[in-house]
Amino acid sequence: YETTRWYTNAFIIQEGSPNKLLLGYKKRGFGAHLYNGFGGKVEAGESPAEAAARELKEECGIDAPLQHCGSLLFVTRGGPEWAFQIEIYRAEEYSGTLTETDEMRPEWFRYPNIADVTPSTDLAVTKENGESLPPIPYDTMWPDDVHWMPLLLAGRHFVGRADFELDNEGKYKMLRWWFGV
Ligand code: 6U4
Ligand code: NA
Ligand code: NA
């Protein structure tokens, strides 16, 4: 590969009525117009955990006791070849005020009861709980997310890999994937 790049992705997950997941609508740059966790590049001299905390603050204005819960490898063909290693973090609490930034617009979504979430749960069909919030917007997220989000929401530690190909229209298509605990 040309290079392996290290990234972070952080999610705030609050069990309750309804269960809430915080995502950000990315307004610019890589993955623009998709919902995702908050994160970005790990910079020189920084640990992934430090980068995760910095990016969370920069992108939506909050601090949180982030815990590492997963590692994902993304490999791409068709364009410049690269691999992304993304470290996934979660927290149940946060401090500070959620703030829209130039890069991200934070929004809450509901998800099914944790007891109903297994690695094979299809969260694209969300159970009727928490009417006031929209369900997780998988159609507007990276296509791998639906496969590992149940593991994240269930509080599991997970690893995975997804391979992408850049198609003729310049869109990333997911060729194959594997996610497990
Ligand atoms: P700069 O250029 O410094 O603003 P930076 O904020 O460091 O960029 P950015 O925003 O490009 O990085 O980070 C990309 C984000 O997208 C990271 O949180 C990782 C995430 N990401 C990339 N591919 C992904 C994928 N296939 N599935 C996923 N998240 C992905 O769920
Ligand atoms: Na970012
Ligand atoms: Na950054």
Image (spheres, rainbow, N blue to C red):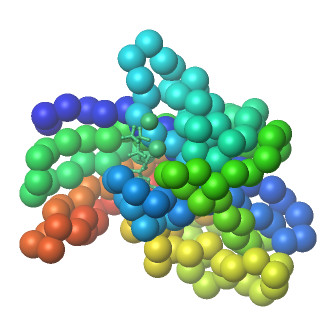
Residue 58, quarter of picture: top right
To which quarter of the image does residue 68 belong?
top right
Residue occupying image coordinates x 71% and y 66%: 108
Q: Is residue 74 left or right of residue 94?
A: left
Residue 71 position within the rendered picture, expressed as x and y whole percent measured from the top left: 47, 40
- How far across and down, in percent of the image, does residue 56 sit? 61, 40
Quarter holding the N terminus is top left
Name of the residue lying farthest toward the top: 45
- Above or below, comparing residue 37 to residue 91 in the picture: below
Q: Position of residue 174 (x, y in %)?
A: 28, 66
Q: Is residue 95 left or right of residue 42?
A: right
Point out the residue furthest to the front here. Answer: 102
Decide if residue 123 is in sight here.
yes
- 9 versus 124 height, above or below: above
Q: In the picture shown, does residue 107 fall above or below 7?
A: below
- Front residue (pair 6, 101): 101
Residue, x 58% and y 51% (percent of image)? 101
Identify the residue at horizontal 74%, vertical 37% (top origin): 64
Q: Residue at x 56, y 80 (%)?
A: 124
Q: Residue furthest right?
A: 17
Q: Is residue 43 left or right of residue 115?
A: left
Q: How many marks?
A: 0
Q: Position of residue 133 (x, y in %)?
A: 76, 77
